[in-house]
Image (cartoon, grey):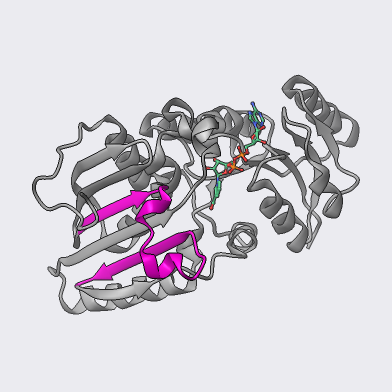
């Protein structure tokens, strides 16, 4: 199939190289990249010929002029910028005749989903988001198992404990990620993966309660059509269980479904390339797919924590 042209926004950040690799591994071309930070030497190992700009205006001019000169489109604009800029960057992509492939969380608030749906319809270009857990083998297996069980027993409600610990150093709270206005806070920035996965498997949200809301640790209870979920999310290393610390790991992800442990700490490495394959083959996850999880995290941001009362996760103290 024909080589497609990509542009990349937020090209010097942590996750950008995975997008570069995904574009390369799917056989396509990165034409141009934008990032106000110029530490982007890594681009040479993937697309040494790509243009690069540190100023948005110059990047936008390049894209416009490229369209005029070449009479060809830039098919996809990938967005790996800070979360609060996603909807502006998606608009830019759609208004310039490109599909957008945007990192999670797709946007910070549900209203932006509606605004982007209108532009999508008007421009005939699509918005895709990276929800790579939906492409993780063990999570697909869990979804298949639950779907089968629910066919036999449609009123079943599972009891779930979800623990999602992914330690971050001091830099986290010095960066945009530690600024709630820019990242949405840790439930939005990190928790969105598991809120998406849970609502994808266990259905729509009926109740959303927050017990603990600290900058580095959030915990709560969420009632889905088919699950009562006690969840605990932290970027604080102190919560990592000792036996995990002893292995040198700084992350721990666990779901207990009706007390049965379901481990999914591994298998995350090449999910960006798998996401791109899915999008390029006519699949992918769009604005409506993101709606449940964006609703959940946006609501968590506005909720007042209840403290330790009701059905809270056992890690809360
Ligand atoms: P990062 O801070 O390392 O990178 C963000 C980059 O955006 C930086 O290089 C920054 O200079 C650049 N930037 C800032 N303002 C910009 C602007 N106005 N225009 C263009 N670029 C701008 O952060 P990151 O960890 O790479 O995260 C980027 C995105 O990827 C976030 O949305 C994050 O939530 C997401 N992410 C997803 C995963 C995943 O597993 N899917 C993992 C990490 C991050």
Asked whether residue 100 is drawn in magenta, I would say: no
Q: Residue furthest top?
A: 57
Say left or right for 286 vs 292.
Answer: right
Which corner quadrant of the image does residue 258 belong to? bottom left
Tell me which segment is drawn in magenta: 229-258
Q: Quadrant of ligand 1?
A: top right
- In the picture, the quarter occupied by the N terminus is bottom right
Q: Toward the viewer: 109 or 115?
A: 109
State whether residue 17 is above or below residue 142: above
Q: Residue at 21% of width from left, 41% of height from top?
A: 210
State whether residue 89 is above or below residue 11: above
Which corner quadrant of the image does residue 281 belong to? bottom right
**Picture coordinates of residue 103 (x, y %)?**
55, 45
**Picture coordinates of residue 218 (x, y %)?**
30, 44
Q: Residue at 44% of width from left, 25% of height from top?
A: 181
Q: Residue at 73% of width from left, 57% of height from top?
A: 21
């Amino acid at each position: 199939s024909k080589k497609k042209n990509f542009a990349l926004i937020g090209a010097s950040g942590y996750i950008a190289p995975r997008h570069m690799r995904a574009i390369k591994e799917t056989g396509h071309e990165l034409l141009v990249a934008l990032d106000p930070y110029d530490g982007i030497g890594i681009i040479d190992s993937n697309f040494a010929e790509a243009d690069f700009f540190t100023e948005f205006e110059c990047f936008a001019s390049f894209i416009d002029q490229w369209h005029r000169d070449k009479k060809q489109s830039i098919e996809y604009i990938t967005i790996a910028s800070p979360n609060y800029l996603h909807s502006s960057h998606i608009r830019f992509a759609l208004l310039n005749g490109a599909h957008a492939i945007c990192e999670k969380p797709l946007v910070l608030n549900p209203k932006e989903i509606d605004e982007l749906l209108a532009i999508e319809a008007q421009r005939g270009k699509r918005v895709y988001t990276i929800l790579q857990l939906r492409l993780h083998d063990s999570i697909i297996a869990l979804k298949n198992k639950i779907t089968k069980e629910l066919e036999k027993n449609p009123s079943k409600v599972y009891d779930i404990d979800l623990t999602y610990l992914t330690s971050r150093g001091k830099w986290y709270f010095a960066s945009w990620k530690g600024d709630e206005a820019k990242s949405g806070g840790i439930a939005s920035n990190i928790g969105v993966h598991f809120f998406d996965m849970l609502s994808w498997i266990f259905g729509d949200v009926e109740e959303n309660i927050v017990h603990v809301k600290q900058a580095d640790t959030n915990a709560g209870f969420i009632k889905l059509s088919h699950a009562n979920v006690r969840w605990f999310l932290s970027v604080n290393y102190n919560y990592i269980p000792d036996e995990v610390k002893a292995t040198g790991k700084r992350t721990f992800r666990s779901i207990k479904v009706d007390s049965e442990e379901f481990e999914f700490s591994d298998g995350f490495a090449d999910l960006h390339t798998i996401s791109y394959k899915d999008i390029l083959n006519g699949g992918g996850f769009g604005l409506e797919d993101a709606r449940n999880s964006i609703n959940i995290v946006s609501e968590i941001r506005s909720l007042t924590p209840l403290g330790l009362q009701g059905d809270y996760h056992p890690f809360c103290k």
